[in-house]
Image (spheres, grey):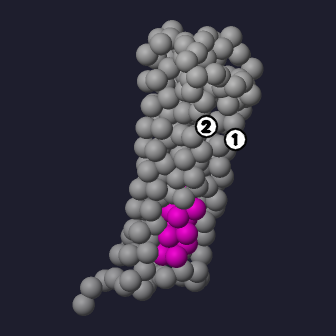
Amino acid sequence: MSSFSGDETAPFFGFLGAAAALVFSCMGAAYGTAKSGVGVASMGVMRPELVMKSIVPVVMAGVLGIYGLIIAVIISTGINPKAKSYYLFDGYAHLSSGLACGLAGLSAGMAIGIVGDAGVRKESLAYFLGVDIPHGVEQSLLIQANAQQPKLFVGMILILIFAEALALYGLIVGIILSSRAGQSRAD
């Protein structure tokens, strides 16, 4: 006879929530980093001096994995059925916490990747500026336009900030949901 208290299947859902938070947030971070990195690499070929200015989306995407790590640690420290009863309510609270943070991080990573790539890539600059570039025009003209358009950079940063806010909302909701675990029954 073990000294397990609570529902024996409940920790499965709690650990699943911790894994979901970390995995989905890291998937969003990886996608955002990869997609933005492609744009930075294409910009750096012609104008290497703009690389550091264009690396902001890569950094912002990398932060998303940290949000998932925070929730995964909070959840995993809350699962100790031998010390305190752990019921299905607690497992579901931790599962929903992990899914809220993880899926919000995934969606934010996708948004950051797409905006970061489009904001620094030379081919998409014409679309942002509303310029129709005729066939055969040298592509470095587009890069020069990016260097001369600080308003485009500011707009891209604002969009990235709002995309990052999506992941912060998931982190906040995840913290609130994980704090609900342990409140299912008065012990």
Residue 172 as seen in the image, left or right of residue 35:
right
Front position in the image: 97 or 162: 162
- Rendered-image quadrant of the C terminus: bottom right
Q: Which residue is denoted by mark 2 in the rendering? A: 115
Front position in the image: 68 or 158: 158
Report x, y in % for residue 107.
Answer: 57, 52
Asked if residue 156 lies in the magenta stretch, the reply is: no
Q: Nearer the viewer, mark 2 or mark 1?
A: 2
| Residue at x 69%, y 36% (from the top left corner) | 159
* Secondary structure beneath label 1: helix
Q: Which residue is denoted by mark 1 in the rendering? A: 162
* Secondary structure beneath label 2: helix
Residue 136 as seen in the image, left or right of residue 41:
right
| Residue at x 59%, y 33% (from the top left corner) | 118
Report x, y in % for residue 47.
Answer: 50, 11
- Rendered-image quadrant of the N terminus: bottom left
Vertically, is 149 above or below 41? Answer: above
Q: Which residues are magenta?
A: 90-101
